[in-house]
Image: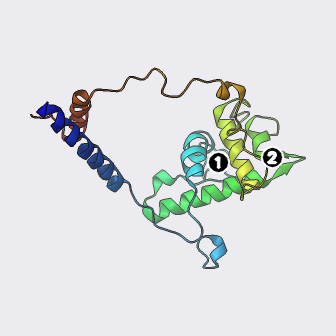
């Protein structure tokens, strides 16, 4: 009984410590003013651009050709490789890339986005079709185009957030999950945080 009381008293402390340690390990980004402040500074790239558009599309597909020395260096869509610089220069390269993507996202061919037509090969694009129309990358780029053309979000909702019949009929997220007992939880937390087994 006494060991059970110790376990239930120590486990929340270890969990709180792990959250505090992970929060302090997160690199804090310097605050930058937005273009609307009139200071001339440019806003930092959004998390959506960095985590989704740049990481999954730009760095993997576009940067191969759309850079200085690349096959598409003569195009109006030239990107910089942020991996080749550090600190403020890396942030500036990411801002330049975000701005280039935003400019392209706002261009239209008829009623459709020019960049979305190019990546699937419907317009002349030296890289042929880079993304399939039903791919995750295409949906991410389409969401970026939607956000770039409707920055305040007052238009139609994103197709990515529209609830479907499959979502409504899905079982609860944690259905079938069995929670650990206190002793096994303490063991895992101690191994994760301290790198050794708990002592009695």
The label number, if any, that marks residue 113 in the structure image: 2
The label number, if any, that marks residue 12 in the structure image: none
- Most extreme residue toward the bottom, as rendered? 39
Name the residue at 14% across, 34% down.
198
Residues 99 and 193: in front is 193
**Residues under numbered marks 2 and 1 in contact, where contact means CB atoms less than 8 Å apart:** no
Q: Secondary structure at mark 2?
A: strand
Residue 125 visible? The answer is: no
Q: Secondary structure at mark 1?
A: loop
On screen, residue 88 versus residue 170, left or right, reads left
- Above or below, comparing residue 126 to residue 85 in the picture: above
- Most extreme residue toward the left, as rendered? 200
- Above or below, comparing residue 31 to residue 158 in the picture: below
- Most extreme residue toward the front, as rendered? 1
- Most extreme residue toward the right, as rendered? 110
In percent of width and height, residue 1 lies at 14, 30
Residues 59 and 192: in front is 192
On screen, residue 75 versus residue 137, left or right, reads right
Name the residue at 24% across, 46% down.
13
In percent of width and height, residue 182 lies at 25, 30
Q: Earlier in the sequence, mark 2 or mark 1?
A: 1
On screen, residue 119 versus residue 173, left or right, reads right
Name the residue at 72% across, 43% down.
158
Residues 160 and 109: in front is 160
The label number, if any, that marks residue 66 in the structure image: 1
Q: Quadrant of residue 127?
A: top right
Name the residue at 49% across, 59% down.
90
In percent of width and height, residue 165 lies at 71, 26
On screen, residue 191 versus residue 58, left or right, reads left
- Foreground: disc 2 or disc 1: 2
């Amino acid at each position: 009984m006494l060991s059970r009381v110790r376990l239930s008293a120590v486990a929340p402390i270890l969990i709180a410590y792990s959250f505090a340690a992970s929060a302090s390990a997160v690199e804090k980004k310097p605050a930058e003013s937005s273009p609307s402040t009139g200071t001339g500074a440019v806003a930092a790239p959004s998390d959506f651009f960095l985590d989704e558009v740049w990481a999954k599309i730009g760095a993997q597909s576009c940067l191969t050709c759309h850079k200085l020395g690349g096959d598409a260096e003569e195009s109006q869509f030239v990107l910089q490789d942020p991996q080749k610089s550090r600190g403020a220069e890396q942030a500036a390269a990411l801002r330049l890339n975000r701005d280039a993507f935003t400019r392209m996202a706002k261009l239209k061919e008829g009623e459709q986005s020019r960049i979305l037509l190019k990546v699937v090969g419907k317009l002349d694009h030296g890289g042929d079709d880079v993304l399939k129309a039903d791919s995750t990358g295409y949906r991410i780029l389409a969401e970026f185009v939607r956000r770039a053309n409707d920055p305040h979000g007052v238009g139609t909702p994103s197709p990515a957030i529209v609830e479907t019949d499959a979502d409504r009929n899905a079982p609860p997220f944690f259905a079938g999950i069995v929670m650990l007992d206190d002793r096994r939880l303490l063991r895992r937390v101690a191994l994760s945080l301290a790198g050794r087994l708990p002592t009695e």
